[in-house]
Amino acid sequence: MSDNAEEPGLQPTDADGSGVDQVIDARGLRCPEPLMLVRNQIRRQAPGATLQVFATDPSTERDLRDFCRFMGHELVSSEERDGVWQFVLRKGG
């Protein structure tokens, strides 16, 4: 069993065939929980690795945008569809 199995909302690598390295499902969680899950996971990833995040708290968009800017990561995409935000982040070097 991998270390990731105990992380709430974390799915295995490329779980949905999207080509991302890791997926976090933070739907239903409120600020600051989605950001904390992202922060903890991205610390374990290698530079250049991608992380897909699903969230329903609208403040997550602002939080992840600021997080990426301050920490040197790239917010590759940010999209809202039917009340669910989907983000893809790339870990900076």
Image (spheres, rainbow, N blue to C red):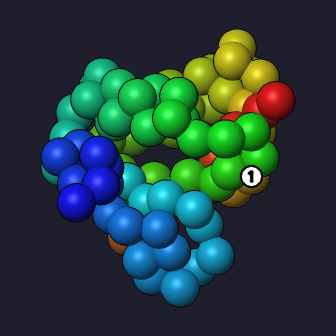
Q: Which residue is found at the position 69% from the left and 18% from the top? A: 71
Look at the image and tell me whether residue 92 can be seen: yes
Name of the residue lying farthest toward the top: 70
Name of the residue lying farthest toward the bottom: 17
Name the residue nearer the viewer: 63 or 73.
73
Q: How many marks?
A: 1
Name the residue nearer the viewer: 42 or 67.
42
Q: Which residue is mark 1?
A: 76
Name of the residue lying farthest toward the right: 93
Residue 34 in percent (x, y) is at: 33, 36
Residue 15 in percent (x, y) is at: 42, 77
2 left or right, relative to 71: left
What kind of element bears circle 1?
A: strand
Quadrant showing the N terminus: bottom left
Residue 2 in percent (x, y) is at: 30, 55
Q: Which amino acid, mark 1?
A: Val
- Quarter where residue 79 is shown: bottom right
Residue 91 in percent (x, y) is at: 70, 38
Q: Which residue is found at the position 58% from the left and 79% from the top? A: 18
Look at the image and tell me whether residue 62 can be seen: no
Quadrant showing the C terminus: top right
Q: Is residue 75 above or below residue 19?
A: above
Q: Is residue 33 above or below residue 17?
A: above
